[in-house]
Amino acid sequence: MVMEALMDAGRFFINPLLYIALIAAILLGYFRVKKERKLFRSRIVWGGREFGDWLKDGILFALLLSVLFSGIGLTVPLQWLVALSLVSAVIVISGIYQLGSFVYLAIGAVFFGWLLNHYGWTIPFGLFDFGGYAVAWDWLLPVGLITGALVFVEGWLVARRGSEASSPRTEKTARGLTAVYYKTKRLWLIPLLVVVPGEFMGSYLPYWPQFPIGESNFSFILFPAVIGFGSRARRTLPGYLYPKHGKRIWLLGLAIITLALFSFIWEPMALIALAAGAAGRAAISLLTMFNENKGNHAVAPQSSGVMIVDVLADSPAEKMGLVRGEIIRKVNGLTINNETELYEAIQVNAAHCRLEVLDHNNELRLRQHVIFRHDHYRLGLIVV
């Protein structure tokens, strides 16, 4: 039994989706740093952050959901997992992470498998030919419940990590000034232990280990589920936008689970839950996009001082507790109005810097820090 479990875990590393997602996470960090260096002459956070958080953020949910799904006996067909891998790989490779929500991937896999079966198309994979499947109500309920749970996880990750994952970009305002918006692009991996009926496994992989329950055989598969997220914050600072955005998403996840459970009463409700979930997720994204594209930029040039775009990691500015969107009014007792005056004022007392800062509540606070030789010569501030 232990050897079979180890074999199942080892087969997790055979799925090409795992390596596609891994490479994509590395490239996300690389291109983010490249863009930040081009715009601000410095990276804000180290380039391996996306890769470091790729699996770490979702591992606890992966354990909890794997135990939950296996414990209550949710079984999904192998064909749907194959279709899900293909749809997920296309989205990850395309880089369109706005379509990376698991509800889009799940219903996309259902439709893709049905399409192949309906038109008699096949995709050769060497060991087997994938020809899709007929949609059946009995396995759509587990798919709906799994999808709702992963949309809930997506909402939690967006609420907790969305702001951290955002990177500043510049654009021109209607008056020709340089303002800032924040772009978020993130990919998460959730390794899920799912149960597959033995008759599905036997037709594709006859040597896969199975276990009997009554007269039926089942197999465990460790599947690399991916969740993509893409958005931008313009009118609202990311620290305020994404907690609300994430809450809407995890509430949608609970709604998908609730609707899917009604399939015990009327079987088509599982498919309706997936369709309603996809529509709801699109509505959340569109609502956020419309709200963020109207009105003024949250971060733009100010007449009352210099606004902070971002703070470099492990810098004096971070140690002083400075955050995005705050306005620096005075440095070492000198009033400043632009970036040049800011850095000239810093040099007045290069060993001990004192700042007057206007926070998000328009309240004035004082910050000071001793500057050491190894510290960033510009305090680690990105300003506009």
Image (cartoon, helix red, strand yellow):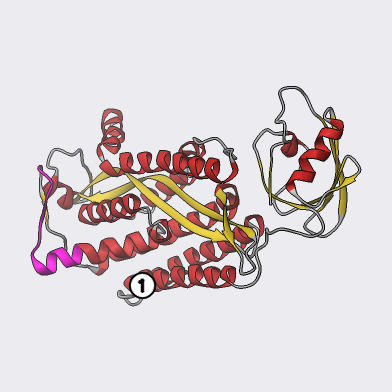
Name the foreground residue: 196 vs 288. 288
Name the foreground residue: 328 vs 271. 328
Residue 59 visible in this rendered orientation of the protein: no
- Residue at image x 36%, y 39%? 23
- Residue at image x 77%, y 57%? 360
Q: Residue at the top extreme?
A: 373
Residue range (magenta): 113-126
**Which residue in the protein does label 1 denote?**
275
Q: Is residue 34 left or right of residue 122?
A: right
User: What type is the residue that disc 1 sits on?
Assistant: Ala
Residue 31 visible in this rendered orientation of the protein: yes
Q: Is residue 328 left or right of residue 229?
A: right
Q: Quadrant of residue 268?
A: bottom left
Image position, residue 197 (x, y; %): 22, 52
Q: Quadrant of residue 121?
A: bottom left
Please determine whether, in this image, residue 9 is positioned above or below residue 177.
above
- Residue at image x 35%, y 76%? 265
Label 1 neighbour load within 10 Å: few <14, some 14-19, many 20+: some
Please determine whether, in this image, residue 231 is positioned above or below residue 357.
below
Name the foreground residue: 131 vs 3. 131
